[in-house]
Image (cartoon, coloured by chain):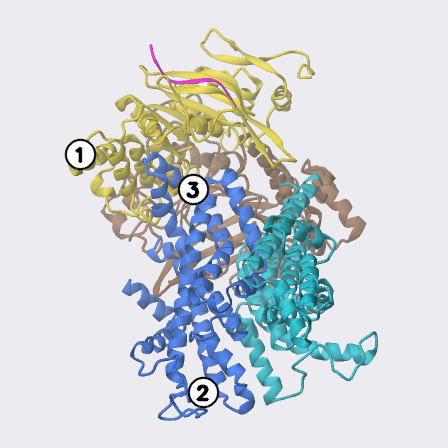
Chain colours: A brown, B cyan, C yellow, D blue
């Protein structure tokens, strides 16, 4: 058993679109290499249509047409249950769901069956993997809800009767009740108000620490990553462009795109002019040649237009895909006065 | 709970409004008719035997009182409501002097039974198969069922009934094509009668089921193929929830909510279909009665059948509507 | 000194349900503030969902009728049901920008259609040349040009370009006041600063006052001259932006600030919020209170001490 | 326009079949304009002749050539269905868009009326009208009456779309761009309602022609006007099936089924195609 619970190599997943003879491929995930360690929170950041949601779908074994796995492998190393999603059959995948691998989907309102009481949903989801029924099952659920600061009464409620924050805690409860080793969390707090968001994030972080589960936490919001992730990976146009320890990503980004994302977070107590990034993310049906960020990159040179930079290690745990990474400097001082701890 | 009562009150108000407007429309439309019920009745009676002019004048007097046709239209209208509430709409002409209401009540059970049974079969069959077809979109069997539904759905009631009549009446005469029961059995609670009734109901019911099946099937298939892409279904699948639970409690259960509304909305159409089918198979229900009444110019009977149809359909819609909040927990707190 | 906008003691109650199960929701309660006509400023309204900030904005735009109080724009009462001429008159002074740039224009129509309609309707002398000049001038103000935008459909442009085009559309009548209801797309960090910086330049370079509605304290701090914080329909704190956000006084303002995810200590995972602030903000939200003046120009809601004062 | 048609025919088999069927039926109905015989005249040909080179569809017991008779019948029925569909579309667009955009008590009262129309069974009502008008119930009067009953389902559909559109941000931008309510409803919102109008147009034609057939077969319309329904009525009244003149019944029914299937397929496929979402996707957004 290695230290890594998930290893993704050269993963490509495309959407095969076909509208009245207009056929094209959207390269949503285009050659991602990364791994996640046991017990860590790995944050994935990226803007809308960067491919991060498609990436999570592949990791969750939720590939549906028109999305299609083109190449690469997704290896999970669960205790006694190693599996490669690229080659596993449906039965193998069913066997790991929820017991080992669970998922918190985007949008708490729409992920719960509107006509089913929360209690029944818990039964549907967890009764089989936990192998518990009746009284024993109920006790287990109630105890788990208590940890999430939810009263047992929510089991009698329908989703629409709960507030947004409570619903989100219910989905976290659903995803964690079987003590999975790996949790995929896709924008779990995006629709929540700031105070509730912070509470839910804390809860998620606490319960993750307690269970020792590994988490992939996806959000566009860099300030969330700053507070929950151990490491952060940045996805741009279907590629992983940089990954590194959270602290370093903020204090010493090595990719111009990351530098820009970090700079676009204003801070209370600071009114210094913040730069904006012009242009738009590329159309993934016809991505630009070379480095996909070059049309918007202030550092772009001729080479960037021709050759795609590889992901290279720039310091322990820190990799970036930029020909000119050594020239990337933080665009704003992000208030990190202390030395970076390695 | 108060919301459910509120919902009930709203539906009940609609029920009352529909009955009021529908029945009033029936009254005023028939009153536009140039047919004078008194004269028609007189003509019919005097054609059977010869009467002295004085006897005819007396009869005219009695009939006018009976139908109340000498009063102004508005007071006739008031009387009409008063009499409708006690179930008396005057004598029918077809079977003079049997009250029109009695004929309606005799015909009603046949129509109600035919309507209820065929609607239930159609609804259950159409939604079940349509739901499964929506969930298993690439299954060849369901695809061919879909083709069948597409070809059946647009054909009008009359044509389907007619085709069945030709098939089973001339091509392969194995089923009775006319009437409600065989002449050889005694009406009552006995086995030969019941069997005969069921036997005679097969073709009318089949024609209703065939026409109705397509639209439920296609509607449910479309609904389900939308619902399977809903997040809560995907999420349950990703959690490894049992397939039968997903199909039953996640997909079908949610698709059924709009279908119940649909059921309420189509009852009027289904009733029209029943009426037509009855005429084709000479089935002793309201439809046959209505058509006979029109041909005979039976004023009171036409009015009775159309008024009762409006009341019955509105009542049935009301009952179906009441199911809706039981299926959808959200409506209770809206 | 004349006022551009005067919101006088405005309240809004919504009734939901029908005749029998009527429920009343107090969306805005006795809100009041004013903006000067002489000094363009960015005035920010901060609040969470259900705070009434959007309802207040809708009332200022005349899309919603106040239950009590009145709103004046340049001394004239805002009335959504006024005749068309007087509405057009109002729209020449006050224009909106909404949340979702991808929704700002009908996806089936060309973008310039909206700019052209605005120019035709609001310019004093609309001939072809002046309309095009006005469209181009407005687009130049937001960093675009008619050559870039003309004849294009919304899906051909990025979110940032669309939001800027939407702002340009709003600028054509030369309005004095722009109401921007959460105009910053939260999902795309790369657009955020370009929109926020644009609002700043509208104030500084073109003298347009802006009401900026948001739940994001950080961008509010970045651009606001003044701001107010709303909790469940009530203004709990209002005053100069930096003073309020540097040292919030009302417990709810302090709670909102505590809820901001700091990036200053990235990776440290400090997510706790002092439970006392949460409790204080919660209990006070149900107690009556009134706004009191402070020396630094802000006004803060103070509440009676008796917990049951509300009765 | 031609590229749209070309796309649809090429990539949507349902549309291709539907278009094929309807083109055939419309051409067939159009032949009535060059008909050598008057459809109201009887005993012009030898009665009860089976289909032959001379009489393609045979002749009926009334001595009429069925081919030419049916061209008139289909022309009249198609025109009838078209009239009902147009009139009831006008009502449903007006009610649906107004109800959805204006809202408030206007919406509530319109929807109340709508609910009443949904709940009243139309067949007894049509029979009542026949009872009143008798043989004066010609196609046009019938079309007017049917149009009054053919709008409520579709008005409700249009209303739900209009309600969604009302709260879309581009509608508010349009308001603040100084566009009038009329312009917003007819230029901004109507395109979103078009797919519904298109597909319900076909469905409404189906529905109304079906009802005409039913009423006519029972003899509840002007039986001297050749329509699909009255052809069947005469066949029925001469017991065509019993006496072995099967072509009098079978040929019109085959043509009716072709028409209905064609209309239905067109409704389904255009609905899918014009839907703004798939339209946007085709534009490459």
Subunit bearing disc 3: D
Instruction: Report which residue position mark 3 lands on.
Output: D168
* Image side of residue C32 versus residue B35, left or right: left
Q: Residues within 10 Å of mark 2 (few under 14, many from 20)?
A: many
Outermost residue toward the left? C129
- For label 1, the SS is helix
Say whether marks 3 and 1 touch (CB < 8 Å): no
User: In the picture, which quadrant includes the C terminus of chain C?
Assistant: top right
Reply yes or no: does residue C7 show up in magenta. yes
* Image side of residue A306 versus residue D56, left or right: left
In the image, what residue occupies the spot 29% across and 46% down? C110
Q: Position of residue B45 (x, y in %)?
A: 67, 71
> Which contiguous range is marked in magenta?
C1-11
Q: CA distance from mark 1 to mark 2?
A: 73 Å
**Res A54 visible:** yes
Subunit bearing disc 1: C
Q: Is residue C222 above or below residue B274?
A: above
Q: Quadrant of residue B192?
A: bottom right
Q: Nearer the viewer, residue B312 or A205?
A: B312
Q: Quadrant of residue C219?
A: top left
Label for residue C130?
1
In the image, what residue occupies the spot 20% across and 34% down? C126
Mark nearer the viewer, 2 or 3:
2
Q: Is residue D60 above or below residue A79?
A: below
Q: Nearer the viewer, residue D198 or B46?
A: B46
Whichever of labels 2 and 3 marks the residue nearer the N terminus, that label is 2
Q: Nearer the viewer, residue B62 or A145?
A: B62
């Amino acid at each position: 058993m290695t230290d890594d619970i998930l290893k993704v190599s050269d993963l490509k997943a495309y959407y095969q679109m076909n509208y009245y003879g207009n056929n094209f491929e959207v390269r949503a995930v285009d050659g991602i290499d990364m791994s996640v360690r046991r017990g860590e929170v790995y944050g994935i950041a990226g803007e809308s249509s960067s491919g991060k949601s498609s990436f999570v779908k592949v990791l969750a074994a939720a590939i549906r047409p028109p999305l299609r796995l083109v190449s690469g492998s997704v290896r999970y190393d669960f205790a006694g249950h190693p599996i490669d999603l690229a080659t596993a059959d449906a039965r193998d995948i069913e066997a790991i769901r929820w017991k080992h691998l669970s998922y918190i989907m985007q949008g708490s309102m729409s992920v719960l069956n509107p006509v089913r009481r929360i209690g029944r949903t818990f039964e549907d989801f967890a009764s089989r993997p936990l192998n518990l029924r009746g009284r024993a099952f109920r006790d287990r659920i109630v105890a788990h809800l208590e940890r999430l600061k939810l009263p047992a009464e929510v089991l009698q409620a329908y989703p629409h009767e709960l507030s947004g924050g409570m619903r989100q805690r219910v989905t976290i409860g659903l995803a964690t009740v079987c003590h999975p080793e790996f949790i995929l969390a896709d924008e779990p707090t995006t629709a929540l108000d700031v105070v509730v968001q912070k509470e839910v994030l804390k809860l998620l972080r606490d319960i993750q620490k307690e269970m020792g589960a590994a988490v992939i936490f996806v959000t566009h919001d860099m300030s969330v990553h700053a507070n929950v992730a151990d490491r952060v990976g940045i996805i741009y146009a279907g590629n992983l462009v940089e990954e590194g320890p959270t602290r370093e990503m903020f204090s010493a980004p090595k990719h111009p795109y990351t530098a820009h994302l970090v700079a676009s977070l204003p801070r209370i107590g600071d009114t210094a002019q913040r730069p904006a990034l012009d242009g738009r993310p590329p159309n993934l049906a016809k991505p630009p040649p070379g480095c996909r960020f070059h049309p918007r990159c202030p550092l772009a040179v001729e080479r960037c237009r021709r050759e795609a930079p590889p992901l290279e290690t720039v310091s322990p745990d820190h990799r970036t895909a930029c020909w000119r990474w050594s020239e990337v400097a933080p665009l704003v001082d992000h208030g990190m006065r202390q030395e970076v701890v390695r | 709970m108060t919301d459910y009562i509120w919902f009930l009150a709203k539906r009940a108000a609609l029920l009352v409004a529909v009955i009021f407007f529908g029945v009033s429309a029936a009254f005023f439309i028939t009153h536009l008719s140039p047919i004078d019920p008194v004269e028609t009745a007189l003509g019919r009676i005097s054609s059977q035997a010869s009467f002295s002019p004085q006897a005819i004048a007396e009869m005219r007097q009695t009939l006018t009182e009976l139908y109340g046709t000498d009063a102004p239209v508005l007071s006739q209208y008031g009387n009409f409501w008063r009499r409708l509430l006690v179930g008396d709409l005057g004598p029918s002409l077809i079977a003079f002097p049997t009250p029109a209401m009695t004929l309606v009540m005799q015909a009603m059970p046949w129509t109600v039974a035919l309507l209820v049974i065929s609607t239930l079969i159609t609804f259950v069959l159409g939604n079940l198969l349509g739901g499964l077809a929506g969930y298993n979109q690439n299954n060849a069997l369901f695809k061919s069922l879909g083709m069948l539904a597409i070809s059946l759905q647009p054909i009008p009631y009359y044509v389907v009934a007619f085709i069945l009549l030709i098939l089973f009446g001339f091509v392969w005469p194995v089923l009775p094509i006319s009437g409600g029961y065989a002449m050889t059995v005694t009406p009552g609670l006995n086995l030969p009668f019941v069997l005969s009734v069921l036997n005679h109901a097969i073709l009318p019911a089949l024609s209703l089921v065939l026409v109705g099946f397509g639209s439920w099937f296609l509607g449910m298939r479309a609904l389900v193929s939308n619902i399977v892409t809903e997040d809560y279904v995907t999420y349950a699948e990703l959690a490894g929830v049992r397939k039968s639970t997903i199909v039953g409690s996640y997909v079908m259960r949610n698709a059924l909510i709009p279908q119940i509304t649909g059921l309420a909305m189509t009852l009027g159409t289904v009733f029209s279909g029943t009426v037509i089918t009855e005429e084709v198979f000479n089935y002793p229900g309201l439809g046959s009665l209505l058509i006979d009444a029109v041909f005979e110019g039976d004023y009171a009977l036409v009015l009775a059948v159309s008024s009762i149809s409006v009341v019955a359909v509105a009542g049935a819609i009301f009952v179906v509507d009441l199911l809706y909040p039981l299926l959808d927990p959200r409506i209770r707190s809206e | 000194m004349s006022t551009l906008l005067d919101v006088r003691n405005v309240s809004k109650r919504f009734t939901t349900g029908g005749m029998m199960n009527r429920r009343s929701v107090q969306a805005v309660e006795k809100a009041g503030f004013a903006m000067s006509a002489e000094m363009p400023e960015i005035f920010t309204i901060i609040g969470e969902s259900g705070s009434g900030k959007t309802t207040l904005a809708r009332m200022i735009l005349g899309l919603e009728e106040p239950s009590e109080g009145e709103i004046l724009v340049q001394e004239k009462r805002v009335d959504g049901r006024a005749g068309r001429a007087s509405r057009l008159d109002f729209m020449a002074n006050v224009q909106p920008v909404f949340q979702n740039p991808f929704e700002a224009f009908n996806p089936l129509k060309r973008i310039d259609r909206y700019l052209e309609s605005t120019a035709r309707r609001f310019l004093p002398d609309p001939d072809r040349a002046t309309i095009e000049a006005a469209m181009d001038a407005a687009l130049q103000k937001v960093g675009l040009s008619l050559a870039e935008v003309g004849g294009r459909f919304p899906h051909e442009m990025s979110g940032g370009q669309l939001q800027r085009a939407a702002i340009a559309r709003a600028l054509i009548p030369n309005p004095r006041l722009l109401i921007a209801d959460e105009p910053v797309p939260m999902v795309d960090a790369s657009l955020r600063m370009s929109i926020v910086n644009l609002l700043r330049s509208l104030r500084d370079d073109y003298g347009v006052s802006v009401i900026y509605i948001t739940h994001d304290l950080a961008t509010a701090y970045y651009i606001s001259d003044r701001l107010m914080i709303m909790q469940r329909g009530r203004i709990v704190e209002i005053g100069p932006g930096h003073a309020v956000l540097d040292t919030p006084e009302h417990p709810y303002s302090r709670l909102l600030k505590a809820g901001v995810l700091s990036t200053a200590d990235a990776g440290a995972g400090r997510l706790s919020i002092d439970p006392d602030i949460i409790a204080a903000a919660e209990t006070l939200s149900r107690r009556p209170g009134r706004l009191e003046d402070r020396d630094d120009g802000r006004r803060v809601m103070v509440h009676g001490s008796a917990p049951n004062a509300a009765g | 326009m031609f590229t749209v048609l070309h796309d649809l025919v090429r990539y949507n088999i349902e549309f291709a079949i539907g278009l094929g069927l309807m083109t055939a039926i419309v051409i067939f109905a159009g032949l009535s304009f060059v008909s050598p015989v008057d459809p109201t005249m009887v005993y012009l040909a030898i009665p009860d002749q089976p289909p032959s080179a001379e009489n393609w569809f045979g002749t009926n017991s009334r001595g009429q050539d069925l081919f030419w008779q049916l061209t008139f019948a289909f022309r009249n029925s198609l025109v009838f269905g078209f009239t009902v569909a147009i009139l009831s579309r006008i009502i449903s667009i007006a009610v649906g868009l107004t109800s959805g955009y204006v809202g408030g008590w206007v919406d509530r009262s319109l929807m109340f009326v709508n609910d009443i129309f949904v709940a009243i069974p139309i067949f007894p009502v049509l029979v009542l009208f026949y009872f009143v008008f008798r043989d004066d119930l010609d196609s046009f009067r019938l079309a007017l009456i049917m149009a009054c009953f053919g709008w409520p389902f579709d008005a409700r559909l249009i209303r739900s779309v209009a309600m969604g559109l009302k709260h879309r941000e581009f509608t508010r931008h349009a308001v603040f761009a100084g566009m009038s309510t009329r312009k917003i409803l007819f230029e901004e919102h109507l395109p979103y309602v078009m797919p519904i109008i298109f597909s319900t147009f076909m469905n409404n034609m189906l529905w109304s022609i079906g009802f005409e057939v039913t009423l006519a077969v029972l003899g509840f319309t002007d039986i001297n006007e050749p329509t699909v329904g009255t052809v069947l009525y005469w066949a029925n009244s001469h017991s065509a099936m019993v006496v072995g003149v099967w072509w009098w019944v079978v040929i019109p029914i085959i043509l009716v089924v072709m028409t209905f299937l064609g209309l239905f397929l067109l409704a389904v496929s255009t609905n899918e195609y014009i839907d703004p979402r798939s339209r946007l996707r085709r534009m490459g957004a």
